[in-house]
Image: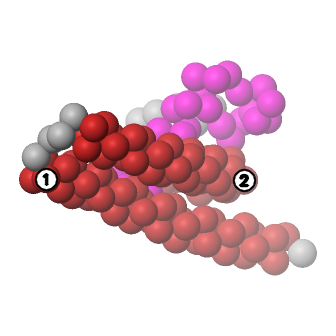
Amino acid sequence: MPTDVWTKNYIKDLTEQELQHFQEIVISDVKNNASSEDKTILSNNLELWLYCLQLTRREVELKLSRFKTALKAKVKEKFDQCAPQEEIVDLRIAEETWRNNAVRFLNAIEKKVLYVKLLIDEEEMIED
């Protein structure tokens, strides 16, 4: 079981490595691969969980943007090289598959963001 260093410390006091490890737990949870211990760690650190989800979403959105630009460049390169049409179509299919998976991952992130926000709201209502 991983040691929960996140609950006991302020975010500003966490090392880059500790934040990275928490981010890995968050990504594992988004992919529905988190252990029960990991889920406990996440639920004990709602604000950090939300932050990491938002950070991950922005990183994926940036990758999608870069990806679209790279695809255009690759297709142009294939045309310039007079590559067979089949090769260009295969490239577009592979790239579109990656893009669809990334969008599906973004959707999973957004569902988790909404869930964590509900947990935070619920926690605030209990405290009041």
Q: In the rendered image, which residue does mark 1 sit on?
A: 85
Query: Does residue 21 show up magenta in the picture?
Result: yes
Quadrant of the rendering where the N terminus is positioned: top left
The answer to whether residue 127 of the structure is visible from this angle is: yes
Please name whichever residue, 113 or 34, is drawn nearer the observer in this view of the structure.
113
Colour pattern of the rendering: secondary structure
Nearer-N-terminus badge (2/1): 2
**Distance from the alpha carbon under mark 2 to that under mark 1:** 50 Å
Amino acid type assigned to the residue bearing label 2 in the image? Glu
Estimate the x, y position of residue 75 in percent, counting from the top left: 30, 46
Estimate the x, y position of residue 20 in percent, counting from the top left: 55, 31
In the image, residue 126 sits, relative to residue 25, either above or below, namely: below
Q: At 67% across and 22% down in the image, what residue appears?
A: 15
The answer to whether residue 28 of the structure is visible from this angle is: no
- Label 2: which secondary element: helix
Image-based side of 12 in relation to 84, left or right = right
Tag shown at residue 47: 2
- Label 1: which secondary element: helix
Picture quadrant of residue 13: top right
Q: At 58% across and 22% down in the image, what residue appears?
A: 17
Q: At 47% across and 68% down in the image, what residue appears?
A: 107
Q: Which residues are magenta?
A: 6-34
Amino acid type assigned to the residue bearing label 1 in the image? Gln
Quadrant of the rendering where the C terminus is positioned: bottom right
